[in-house]
Image (cartoon, rainbow, N blue to C red):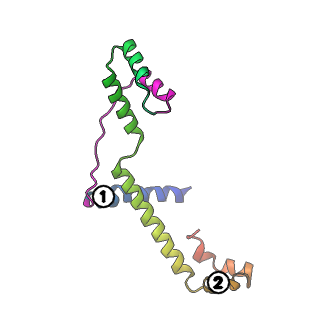
Amino acid sequence: SSGINAEYGVRSVFERYVGSSIALLAGIRQCKRRPFSENVRLESLLAQHSYAMPPDMALVALSKETAESVKSQQRWIRRRQQAIFSTRHTKFTESSWRFVFYSTMFIYGIISLWEEDFLWDTKHCWIGYPIKIWAMKDKIYWYS
């Protein structure tokens, strides 16, 4: 549990400072999304249509009930749908974290297993099987 919290902390710091800096250097800006007001009727209509744009007839019927224009309802739905999806900046920082993490773990795995016989010849995997695994435990503990 503490290992997961430590990884989350490292990940958060990396995404906020390193990943964001790389994203800015790559020309990916962090955009602020416009907030949307709470609208219970439109929210229920969206839920009925699996958060896709409802058909125009449903919007026209709702606009007659609420005295809101169809255009303003469509604008609210677009803003609501955008709130669900991540921005390009967020996707970039998360992907950069995954790239650094998995690259680091791959290199650590190669380094820790480089001098082992069974890396080069699979016949050696089963020679001295249970004892060999315990002898390697210190090397592969952090890798697994």
Q: Please say whether residue 142 is one of the residues in the magenta stretch.
A: no
Q: Position of residue 9 (x, y in %)?
A: 43, 56
Query: Looking at the image, which is closer to me, 101 or 29?
Result: 29
Q: Position of residue 60 (x, y in %)?
A: 38, 18
Label 2, label 1: how far apart the Cα atoms are: 41 Å
2 or 1: tag closer to the N-terminus: 1
10 Å crowding of disc 1: few (<14), some (14-19), many (20+): many
**Amino acid marked by disc 1:** Ala
Q: Position of residue 72 (x, y in %)?
A: 31, 24
Displayed quadrant of residue 85 = top left
The residue singled out by tag 2 in the image is 118
Query: How many marks do you count on the picture?
Result: 2
Q: Secondary structure at mark 2?
A: helix
Instruction: Give the residues drawn in magenta, as a range.
Output: 25-51
Please say if 76 is above or below 143: above
**Amino acid marked by disc 2:** Phe
Please say if 141 is above or below 113: above
Residue positioned 67% across, 83% down in the render = 122
Query: Looking at the image, which is closer to me, 143 or 77?
Result: 77
In the picture, measured across the screen, residue 125 lies left or right of residue 33, that is right
Residue positioned 50% across, 70% down in the render = 105
The residue singled out by tag 1 in the image is 23
Residue positioned 35% across, 47% down in the render = 87
Q: Please say whether residue 29 is one of the residues in the magenta stretch.
A: yes
In the picture, measured across the screen, residue 93 lies left or right of residue 24, that is right
Please say if 131 is above or below 21: below
Q: Quadrant of the N terminus?
A: bottom right
Q: Quadrant of the C terminus?
A: bottom right
The circle on residue 111 is: none
